[in-house]
Image (cartoon, grey):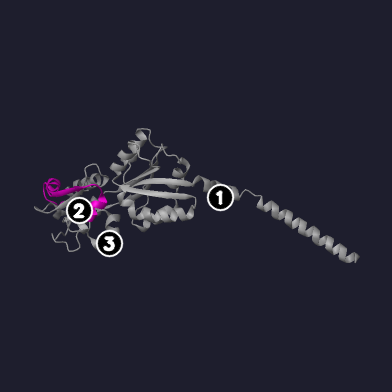
Amino acid sequence: MKLDRRLAGLVLTVVTVVAACSGADTATPTATPTAAAASTAAGSLTIYAASSLTAAFTEMKTAYQTANPGVTLTLSFGASSTLETQIEQGAPADVFASADTSNPQKLVGKSLAAGAITTFAGNLLTVIVPPANPAGIKTPADLARTGLKFVAAGDSVPITKYANMLLANLAKQPSYPAGFVAAVSANIVSKEDNVAAVVSKIELAEGDAAIVYVTDASTAGSKVTTITVPTAANVPATYGAVAVKASSNAAAAAAFISWLVSPGGQAILAKYGFLPPPG
C-alpha cells in the first residue's frame, strides 16, 4: 500500500508538471497575432475596380472571404476614370483598384486617399476581332484600312490612353502606312464606357476590331480572335490601388490592398493573365 501511495504521488506530480507545461505553451502569444489579423481584416468593404479586373476580382472575393470569415466584400466595376469621379463625389468606396496609376494619383493629390498608391499588377495590349474575322484583319496595320469599323473606349478611359500609345508606337514600324494613327482614328465607329463594353461589341460582331488588354482577350476566349501586336510596340499597363480616406473601415481596406500584392492575391491575378507589378 505504501508503494502504491508513492506511485500515486509520483503520477500526480508528473501530471501536475505536464499540465503546468501545457498551460505555459497555450499562454504563448501565438493566438494574439491571429486575433489581431482577423480584427484588422474584419467588416464590410466596398471595392471599386476597373472593369478589366472583373473576372479576377470576382474569384478574389470568394478566396478572400474564405480566408477572412469576418469580411464581406462588395464589388463595383467600371471605367477607372468613372470610378475615380464617383469617389471624388462621395461614393462610399473603401478601396479603389484602377487600371492605371494616374486615376488613383488624382485621389492622392486631392487628399482623398489614405496613403500612397500600391501597384499590384501589370498588363499588355492586343487587338481583337470577331471569331469569324469578317474584315480579314491579319496584322494591326490593317486597322488603318478605309471603311474598317474600329471600336474604342471613351477618351478618359485608361485603355484609350494605352491604345493611343500603342498606335503611336505602331506608326513608327517600317511596314505601317503613313498617316496610320489618323486613319485608325477615322475608323472609330463607337466609344464605349469601359473596356468590358468594347470587348462585348467585338464578341457580338458589332465592330471589326478593337484594342484591349491581353487579359480581356484571354477571358473572352473563343468569343474573339486575337491579332498579335509586335512586342517592340506593345505598351505595359500598370494597375494601382489606394485605400479611400473616407472609408469607415480603414484597417480592413489596408489589409485587402496588402493581400493584393501577397502570393495569394498575385496567384489569382496571374491565373487571369495579369503580370506582376513593375519594380
Query: Tag 1: residue type?
Result: Thr
In the current view of this chain or complex, which residue is farthest to the right?
A: 2
Separation of residues labelled 1 and 2 (CA atoms): 47 Å
Query: Tag 3: residue type?
Result: Gly
For disc 2, the neighbor class at 10 Å (few under 14, some 14 to 19, many from 20) is many
Q: Are marks 1 and 3 in contact (CB under 8 Å)?
A: no
| Residue 255: % across, % down | 46, 46
Task: Describe residue 143's horizontal placement relative to residue 112 as left or right.
Answer: left
Which residue corresponds to the image point at 45% horizontal and 53% vertical from the top-left? 65
Q: Range of the magenta residues? A: 174-200
Separation of residues labelled 1 and 3 (CA atoms): 40 Å
Residue position marked by numbered label 2 in the rendering: 210
Which residue corresponds to the image point at 80% horizontal and 58% vertical from the top-left? 13
Q: Which quarter of the figure has residue 14?
A: bottom right
Q: Nearer the viewer, residue 7 or 116?
A: 7
Label 3 secondary element: helix
Label 2 secondary element: strand
| Residue 251: % across, % down | 48, 42
Q: In terms of sequence position, does the residue under pointer 3 or pointer 2 come before the other?
A: 2
Residue position marked by numbered label 1 in the rendering: 34
Q: Is residue 183 magenta?
A: yes
In the current view of this chain or complex, which residue is farthest to the top?
A: 110
Separation of residues labelled 3 and 2 (CA atoms): 15 Å
Q: In terms of sequence position, does the residue under pointer 1 or pointer 2 come before the other?
A: 1
Q: In terms of sequence position, does the residue under pointer 1 or pointer 3 come before the other?
A: 1
Q: Is residue 14 magenta?
A: no
For disc 3, the neighbor class at 10 Å (few under 14, some 14 to 19, many from 20) is few
Residue position marked by numbered label 3 in the rendering: 221
Which residue corresponds to the image point at 40% horizontal and 39% vertical from the top-left? 244
Query: Tag 2: residue type?
Result: Ala
Visible residue check, residue 17:
yes
